[in-house]
Amino acid sequence: MTTLTPVLTENWDKPDSFTLDGYGDYSAARKALGMDPDAIIQAVKDSGLRGRGGAGFPTGMKWGFIPQGDGKPHYLVVNADESEPGTCKDIPLMMANPHALVEGVIITSYAIRANHAFIYVRGEVLHVIRRLRAAVQEAYEKGYLGSDIFGSGYDLELVVHSGAGAYICGEETALLDSLEGYRGQPRLKPPFPAVAGLYACPTVINNVESVASVPSIVANGAAWFASMGTEKSKGFGIFSLSGHVTRPGQYEAPLGITLRELLDMAGGIREGHRLKFWTPGGSSTPIFTEEHLDVPLDFESVGAKGSMLGTRALQIFDETTCVVRAVLRWTEFYAHESCGKCTPCREGTYWLKQVLKRLEKGQGTEEDLSTITDIADNILGRSFCALGDGATSPIHSSVKHFRDEYLKHFEIGGCPFDPAASTVWGKA
Amino acid sequence: MTYAPEVRERLERDAKEIIGRYPKSRSALLPLLHLVQSEDGYVSDDGQEFCAEMLGLTKAEVVGVSTFYTMYKRKPAGQYHVGVCINTLCAVMGGDQIWEELTEHVGVGHDETTADGKISLERLECNAACDFAPVMMVNWEFFDNQTPASAKQLVDDLRDGKDVAPTRGPKKLCTFKEASRVLAGMSDGLAGDGPSAAGPSLEGLRLAKEKGWSKPPREGAE
């Protein structure tokens, strides 16, 4: 049986966890700044840490792509633009434990030889922004940021930068454009940010949870981290359960835990109901059903079953939920958030929305099902960035698993579900 | 330029401090737009002109950016900007019903402000608090686990000038303009208010403690 392994969440129940007193003395950063930067990169490679923002790219390898001795400034940019529907781990992490992130920023920046780092946090989370700024301020006052940190001769400036409401800015190159003061639209790759990122200089962009995990690797060792998780998906991660579960919340566990195990911990599906469908890692990951309860939640196993681990945002829906309604709403989200740069995504999400609206009202035809999958086929792999690809996941997976439910809508000329039954206060 | 000289002077002082944080000045554009929003309650014409002047950009360049981001309001937001999450999970858990009843109760729709300027409403996309669904935000502070009744009560209290506290945030809700100033990068000294974490955020930790589960021992510690 898999058990929980609180690392990043370990101090969240302390009333002062967001202050230095409640966090600790940055001993991992102190240790790191006495090390050769390349040794830190090697340790993170050895740990097997993979990006916690969804894509799962090996973190140490990403750091290793930064050219050294190139005479250019290097930058670290933390992607704290958490906006993927269902994803709600980085926000409580930065609210309760911002120093883990700041300490991770120091170690990461030192490893990649950056003297300037940014935390790009979505703007819609005011108190999280306050907590981050206060933590950065405290770190400056203690001499953990600024010049000659720990007397090592190493200098680092850290700026907390608020976004302004745009899901696309979670795409790393759109984030860079936004941070440079432009509309947040993705850039053509290559060149990759490691070569030409912020201000056309070598830049590492890492997710909050990835960076916040680094101090624990430096403090406890790469082998310690790698002792958790599965063969290719090492370490721990925060699993966020939401929706029709008895005790939704944040569960920090080794990668490879299953939804069945997590549901056991969370008291199961809400009383009197049963699981219908769920997302393994946010709305951009194809939906799963009851048959996937025992899939190990690691990058490989979830991928092998046709979805993606993503951000471990487990949105759970019971049998009262209309899958067509769910998919329509996600599709409206993607249409709203499409940045407009490329045609397949801009036009495709717009038309998907129109057809799905018709289907949900029971005014569609069986041909509409071919239309939405055809539109999705024309977005997937043809759009400029992953937003468009993500928009097709709910479409393809819902038609695959719940074709009959789509058909039912136009057989009876409306939605067969009562939306009141799926609410928190709804009666079974 | 229609800002009064003392306002202009204050804004310039703040703007210069913000610009000084960045290696390249244009990076300060998003914060500066939040800053002018903290003065005017929206991104005004004067405000955009001010940003352009401070950063050596054309006004068209500034407008091109401000219109891309949904947090920049093109007409005055209410003193309390109230958002209801209507993305799938919150919608299913009751957000749709909350929105319907609230918009009816307040008498304004999406991106509209009441005549007294107190309340504006917005249909929000996911605000990263799904384990607290259905979620509402007021001036970008969390109001977790809402119901149609609690939502209407909340708005009534705000209109009546009662003190209202977010679920996870400061003891007292600040105004939309005050919130915008924090977003611009200025401190209001309230970071210490409110819990570290609450409710669902602590479920996993609570269970781990109850069961005696923990992370493995440090390398070489055994």
Image: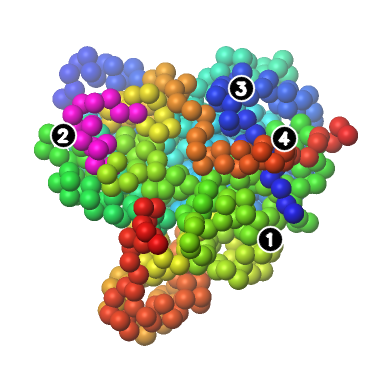
Q: Residue at x 35, y 44 (%)?
A: B146
Tell me if label 1 and label 3 are in contact, CB under 8 Å.
no
Q: CA distance from mark 1 to mark 4?
A: 24 Å
Indicate the position of residue A84 as horizontal and vertical percent values: 47, 52
Are discs 2 and 1 located on one and the same chain?
no
| Amino acid at circle 2 | Gly
Tell me if label 3 and label 4 are in contact, CB under 8 Å.
no
Residue A197 left/right relative to B192: right
Q: Quadrant of residue A416?
A: bottom left
Residue nearest the viewer, comparing A47 with B162 = B162
User: SS of the residue at dot 2?
Assistant: loop
| Amino acid at circle 4 | Ser
Task: Name the quadrant of the C terminus of chain A.
Answer: bottom left
Name the residue furthest left.
B115
Indicate the position of residue A406 as horizontal and vertical percent values: 39, 78
Q: Residue at x 56, y 56 (%)?
A: A268
Q: Which mark is residue A216?
A: 4
Residue located beneath label 3 in the image: A22
Q: Which mark is residue B117?
A: 2
Of labels 1 and 4, the one closer to you: 1
Count of all numbered marks drawn on residues in the image: 4
Q: CA distance from mark 1 to mark 3?
A: 34 Å
User: SS of the residue at dot 4?
Assistant: helix
Residue A2 left/right relative to B196: right
Q: Which mark is residue A296?
A: 1
Q: Which mark is residue A414?
A: none
Tell me if label 2 and label 3 are in contact, CB under 8 Å.
no
| Amino acid at circle 3 | Gly
Tell me if label 4 and label 2 are in contact, CB under 8 Å.
no
| Amino acid at circle 1 | Pro
Q: Circle 2: is it few (<14), some (14-19), or many (20+) Cα within 10 Å?
A: some
